[in-house]
Amino acid sequence: MAWLWGAGIVALAAAVLYWHIVVTEGAYLGQGIVTLLYDRYAHKYNRIKEFNPQEEHLFVAAPLVQALGADFEGVLVDVATGTGRLPRAMRAHPGFHGVVVGVDRSTRMLAEARDMLPDVPLVVASAMRLPFADGSAGAATCMEALEFFPRPVTGLRELARIIQTDGVLLATNRIGWETKLMPGKTFSSAKLTRLLTDLGFDAVKIRPWLDIYNQVWARKTPSRH
Ligand SMILES: C[S@@+](CC[C@H](N)C(=O)[O-])C[C@H]1O[C@@H](n2cnc3c(N)ncnc32)[C@H](O)[C@@H]1O
């Protein structure tokens, strides 16, 4: 009987560990653990994700260039840039004439980005406290990352803070059954719209993207800031 209890405890511990490390990627264990995991697997990230340049162009860079306008020459801050997926897509778009800056807490993820984007400014910093002045970015993006932040609402607040009046936000919000295993890390579309409105955005649009994310678009309302 004792062995049965032992096996049960081991199975439970393994399930909890799997949830913490694989499903939620350390999100409930603090920024340090999330960063440690991304540092550890940075060299495999691009291989695992298999980014398709055509899809990145069609579903990320092209709509962003359209939202920014052809004459955009400002700063686009990509928060939690990882290996530079969004900067790569933007730099490959002939219609993008702005400056893209990547921010991430994982130095190894940024090292991978630097290999492919040697002239893109990459900053090691936490999304919980971005090292940019209020209203200093014409646009800010945050792809596939909000759910790994210790406080996703603080992440959104920081994005809102650095975006200038009339600037553009593109973020992603995790959807799908796994969100049930990530309480407090994802939002319903209604809650997200309310939150972004409270943070001074309008024109909030939420569209399906990939299998497990929605893209969230919004523009900083001129009259409120
Ligand atoms: C799934 S990856 C997404 C990377 C990239 N945006 C993409 O779409 O490929 C999540 C990224 O968020 C970063 N990250 C997680 N928590 C962070 C935090 N608190 N501050 C800054 N970056 C963070 C990780 O280091 C990792 O590079």
Image: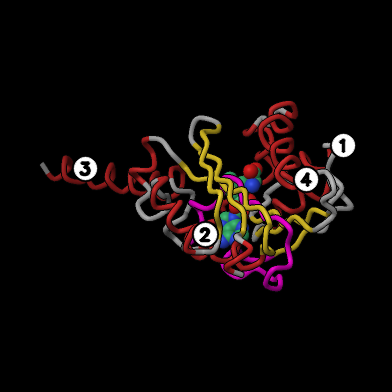
Where is residue 38? Give x, y as percent. Answer: 60, 51
Mark 3 vs mark 4: in front: 4
Q: Are marks 3 and 1 in contact (CB under 8 Å)?
A: no
Mark 2 beta carbon near ligand 1 (under 8 Å):
no
Is 157 drawn above or below residue 26 in the view shown?
below
Is tag 1's residue or tag 2's residue first in the polypeptide sequence? 2
**Callout 4: 10 Å neighbours few (<14), some, many (20+)?**
few
Q: Residue under label 1, please give it.
A: 94
Q: Please name the amino acid that badge 1 sits on.
A: Pro
- Report the Cα–Cα distance between label 3 and label 2: 27 Å
Compared across the picture, whether 110 is left or right of 105 comes to: right
Where is residue 145? Give x, y as percent. Answer: 56, 50
- Report the Cα–Cα distance between label 3 and label 1: 57 Å
Q: Are marks 1 and 2 in contact (CB under 8 Å)?
A: no
Q: Are marks 4 and 2 in contact (CB under 8 Å)?
A: no
Helix or strand or loop: what does disc 4 sit on?
Answer: loop
**Callout 2: 10 Å neighbours few (<14), some, many (20+)?**
some
Q: Are marks 4 and 1 in contact (CB under 8 Å)?
A: no
Q: Which mark is residue 8?
A: 3
Helix or strand or loop: what does disc 2 sit on?
Answer: helix
- Report the Cα–Cα distance between label 1 and label 2: 38 Å
Is tag 3's residue or tag 2's residue first in the polypeptide sequence? 3
Q: Residue under label 4, please give it.
A: 69
What residue is rendered at 67% in x and 72% in y? 134
Q: Residue furthest bottom?
A: 133
Compared across the picture, whether 77 is left or right of 161 comes to: right
Is tag 3's residue or tag 1's residue first in the polypeptide sequence? 3
What residue is rendered at 10% in x and 41% in y? 1
Screen quadrant of the C terminus: bottom right
- Report the Cα–Cα distance between label 4 and label 1: 13 Å
Magenta segment range?
Answer: 125-150
Let me know if residue 147 is in the magenta part: yes
